[in-house]
Amino acid sequence: MAANPERTRPHVGSHVLLMILLVAFLFPVGWALLSAFKPADDIIRSPLTFDFGTFTFDNYTAMFQDVPIGQGFLNTAVVLLFKGAATMFLAPLAAFAFAKYQWIGKNLVFGAVLITLMLPTIVLIIPLLLEMKELGWVNTYQALILPGAVDAFAIFWMRQVISAVPDELLDAARVDGCGEFAIFWRVVVPVIRPGLAGLGVLTVMNIYNDFVWPVVAASSERMATLQVVLSTLAQNITGNRIGADYATVTGELLAASSVALVPLLVLFILLQRHFINGILAGSVKG
Amino acid sequence: MTALSAAPATRRAPRAGRGPRLRRRLAPYVFVLPFVAVFAAFSVYPLFFTARLSFTDWRGTGAATWVGWDNYTYLLTNPAFWASLGNSAVLWLLIVPVQMVLGILVAVLLNNAKLKLRGLYRVAFIVPFVTPLVAVAQIWVVLFDQRYGAVNAFLGLFGLPDTGWLTTSAWAKPTLALLFLWKTTGFIVIILLSGLQSINASIYEAADLDGASKTRQLWSITVPLLRRTIGFAVVLQTLAVFQMFAEPFVVTQGGPYNSTTTAGYYLYNHITRADLGTGAANSFLLVVLVMALSLLFVRLLRAKD
């Protein structure tokens, strides 16, 4: 990202504003990550201090006993693997057909894609749920994976990316005897790798954080994804520990939230640039 | 079929054989088929289904009864429906104007190449956006707890009384708005930054020569030229605010006294009560509203061109 060459150094006031925001933006996450290592009683008795002398894993050990977070991670991992792979392979492949071929119905289908992009997702929740009931798919992996498996937005975005690949490159491959799929796999995919990386992080982020559809379609304990498990934490903890006091519940709650935060934070710190590209392109979605 | 099986022989001379050309004509259908199948089954079909469902009374089992426009008139004459829209509208007012002003300020500051720690700020401001909403919402519940929360503990240092951030209807909306602002402002900054980078620097140089102050330049150059990007951000956030669901679901369960029953949460209530016809009608009304608002903002921001 190249910045406009501003003529003057930034004012002290702007540093103060940015620093305040920096603290405000990092505080909730930082506070939760640290507090989860405090004795539960201290979290509520002195929420603003941290004493390294009392560092403890108690909240984590209690949480792993009371909350089916392992199952949540497993379910999310399964969905990530299958839904992610479907999006990453099938969306660019379909987008290739939209960008570089003439075929009957192309404009009609693409028009439908554009319309779904503009519709709020909630409009599909009820009929999709009924469809899952009809198919007997409520509380199954299929219900979590198939709807939205080839995201309309991914098609839209990848079509733009692939349109920029020069036709000469594809024709040259044809002259060399490449089949149509080989052109996609050996010519298009390597060229659009940066776009694919952006799509990858966006897809992982969306699937990992998805909540509305999983909570509606698969909220049973066996099928609950990580986010669904998190959403009912308090009930889970008090259900398993009758008479648990507020401090215990809070300690476990923070431990569970921390465990859920860390994977994406680490991924983000490692792949910042791709994240920002993905978020920018993803903002077209609405 | 013969053309296809003859293909390998003519591979090296595409013009001579018909195989590769036929394959080239068929290929797009094969490539697009998986997408079209999933799209038709889980997007197009449900959409038509909702449309029909919204004209019926159906509780999820048994036969659906056709009720014409009843679901729509029921909602449009129901104070609870309007209250849910009102709650979302108040949240919109608490969120979008604040977010745009803050977003523009921060984006302009971050766009300055001479700013120290620019990279750090940019990463820090995106952190909330990549954290899972449900996890953060849980943290919010703990932070804003009236008796034990860190927020009241901090305010107590200045002698301020404990406030029921999540338990009083006056504060529940601002507290949810703050969560939404915290979560998405970094994202808005990124969008605005990308808009800023398309503004030609020579405009500012000319303004400098004319002696225009920085504040003046912000209002007379940056904001007008960013109008399209700002409009885009406003439309995105309007869609998001009116669909807001996970925040009230986790943090307040729509309460206290329905003060955080947003349009999205009210829709979910129909599903939990298995009143699916009304829910379908409600989702269509929301779509119409959200589309109308988006068009309005696009118009407003284009009118000055």
Image (tube, coloured by chain):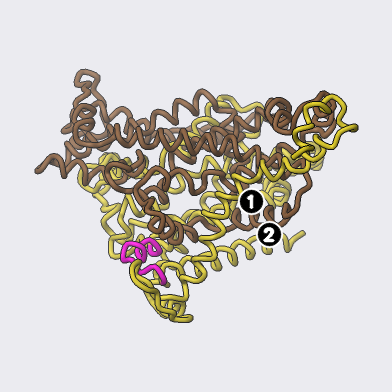
In the image, the chain rendered in brown is A
The chain ID associated with circle 2 is: B
| Dominant secondary structure (helix, strand or loop) of the stretch shown in magenta | helix
**Mark 2 Cα within 10 Å, few/some/many (few <14, many 20+)?**
some
Q: CA distance from mark 2 to mark 1?
A: 9 Å
The chain ID associated with circle 1 is: B
Helix, strand or loop at label 1? It is: helix
Residue beneath label 1, please? B230
Q: Quadrant of the N terminus of chain B?
A: top right
Q: Is residue B231 visible?
A: no
Q: Nearer the viewer, residue B205 or A275?
A: A275
Q: Nearer the viewer, residue B296 or A211?
A: A211
**Mark 1 Cα within 10 Å, few/some/many (few <14, many 20+)?**
many
Q: Which residues are magenta?
A: B266-277
Q: Residue at x 25, y 26 (%)?
A: A37
Examine the rendered structure and indicate whether residue A154 appears above or below residue B289.
above
Q: Residue at x 28, y 59 (%)?
A: B168
Chain B, chosen colour in render: yellow
In the picture, measured across the screen, residue B24 lies left or right of residue A154, that is right
Dividing the picture into quarters, in which one does residue A255 lie?
A: top left
Q: Residue at x 41, y 71 (%)?
A: B277
Q: Residue furthest right?
A: B16
Q: Residue furthest left?
A: A243
The location of residue A191, given as percent across then percent down, is 72, 27
Residue beneath label 2, please? B301
Q: Is residue B236 visible?
A: yes
CB under 8 Å between callouts 2 and 1? yes
- Looking at the rendered structure, the kind of residue marked 2 is Leu
